[in-house]
Image (cartoon, rainbow, N blue to C red):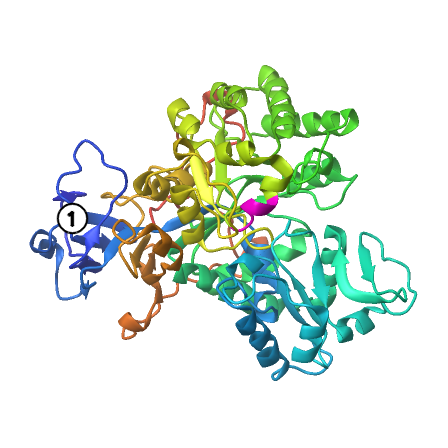
Amino acid sequence: MRTSGARSRGADLILRGGRVWAGLPDDDAGPEPSAVAIADGSVLGLGDDAAIDRWRDPGTRVIDVGGRRIVPGLIDSHLHALRAGHSYLDEVDWTEVDTLAQALASIRAAAATRRADEWIAVLGGWHPAQFRDESRMPTPAELTEASPANPVFVHPLYGYEDHAVLNGPALRALGWTGSCPDPDGGVLERDADGSPNGVVRGLALYQRIAKAASDPDLPRAVASTRAFLERLAALGLTGVVDAGGLGMSPDRYRAVRNLWREGMLPIRVRMNVGPVTRGNERAEVERWQEMLDPALGDDLLAVLGLGEVVHFGCHDWEGLDPFEIDEDSFSEFVATLKETARRRWPVTVHGILEPSVGRILDAFELVAAETPLDGLRWNLCHAELISRHDLERVRRLGLGLAVQGRLSQKVSVVAERWGEQAVRRMLPMGDMLELGIPVGAGTDGTRAASYNPWQSLWFLVSGRSRSGGPERDERNRLDRAHALDAYTRGSAWFSFEDDRRGLLRPGAAADIAVLSADYFAIPEDAIPALTSELTIVAGRIVHRSPVFAELPIQTHARRPSPAPWGGGGQPRHTVLRLQNSRMPAAASSRPYPELFTPPNGSSG
């Protein structure tokens, strides 16, 4: 049995009767445990049921999980969770819809409950390949039949034939009728008479329509963000590294801060921030860095760093079109990174195509020549087409890689652009592991991919796509244990928490998922259907399925009011600044935490 030592009282919670995967084996792994004891938000001990009973006292809640698989809670290393959460309740979620008929029925159901002028939007995260009856987009006419009064906007994940669909009421609501010109940022497909037919193209146009379709006030955004994070908890996620994204200006973070203050934040969130205005990137990054420091927050909600956008001129989007970083953009990018390194901020940078990744690494090397990157955990996200040469540069620089299963639904699309051989080699996991590069897994949900972590895990393990197309080479796949390690402890590396999160050891955070089936035993193609029957964050139950319906959902302690000043000129709340015991001495003027753990050891 593994324990954290003697205690004066028993466990707060014991999970027993299960099969515990504590993480990749270590030197003292021993037999597979069946039980976990939890106290004060941390793992107290693991062992067989009889051994763990030593921690039981009259105040201990004991849950028999009925032979189910227990794993560390999943952490998505790259998910646009706060952007998705902002409008989640106002959208129709097609992530798990498996027929076109069901998809259209969901539009009819939404129309039956909304005012005639209220939009219905389906905003990414799905692909027509998931439809078993007809693998295609709905037509504008079908959307109009399903919702003759409500405007409807449907777009799949980015990169699917590069188009979205509007119904008739939506075209009229936007004024796109008759011989109207194409709006800025996009193209309207037209009938023979020149009238828009409902098929639209262009990323900037999608953003414009999405804002028209849903622009919730703060209370709605708070409720919506909570609903989305609870949805993630139901899939076994206990934390995310939020990737910021288009439109994520400071006001868009108010909803998650409110949840945190109210004690309603179900999972841990680490936030990356970045610019939102093309041409003003450097100034916007400077403003973020003047307002914030890394690790501002606590163990539930904290600022992490900068990214994934640092400069739009160095951002190759979905990697489906040729892209070149011009010299002016590169110079601005380098200048921003140099200041970011001087301030000791972690950075994640988007890069997909081999030329883009190479140029980004050129910039990192220029920065490292002046300011060591040691201890900052800078990283690249995506990196599907990274070369062996550039992987060796990643290792020399001490970078990590945040990889995703974001292409698990559109390999057939990217194969047409990149070629079959590139697709077979993409995400060269064998080289990454051989070189010892830190790797964290995620989805890149929700506009570009499904937010379902099990779909990403299936892609990393199987090498196959739901859209067909060539399979990734066997060397570039992971076995199930290494894939799950990348989705747990591997993702915790990016927030300096890999010795406390993403693994089940005495003293580690009690972030746990009890799965609906045994991930290690089910057929490969059953992996995407996995969910969590019971999800625990910091020892608190944040999700339970009907199997455990009798268990109460537990909230965390409320955070202080945002009111800035009280009587006598004293602050009425404090902001936690966390210390980093491992930060090199030369960087100690801008401390960064190794663990997002309050000084008193509380885990919220």
Residue 89 figure quarter: bottom right
Vertical side of 531 occupied by 549: above or below: below
Disc 1 marks which amino acid? Pro
Vertical side of 150 occupied by 279: above or below: above
Note whether residue 249 is visible. yes
Where in the figure is residue 14, as x and y percent of width and height? 19, 59
Q: Callout 1: helix, strand or loop?
A: loop
> Who's the residue at 14% across and 52% down the image?
8
Where in the figure is residue 28, as x and y percent of width and height? 16, 34
Where in the figure is residue 318, as x and y percent of width and height? 64, 43
- 455 within the magenta span: no
Residue, disc 1 = 33
> Who's the residue at 60% across and 24% down the image?
361
> Who's the residue at 35% across and 69% down the image?
553
How crowded pointer 1 is (Cα within 10 Å; few <14, some 14-19, many 20+) is rated as many
Where in the figure is residue 495, as x and y percent of width and height? 45, 39
Residue 126 figure quarter: bottom right
> Who's the residue at 57% across and 59% down the image?
128
Q: What stretch is highlighted in magenta?
A: 409-413
**Residue sitting farthest toward the left:** 50
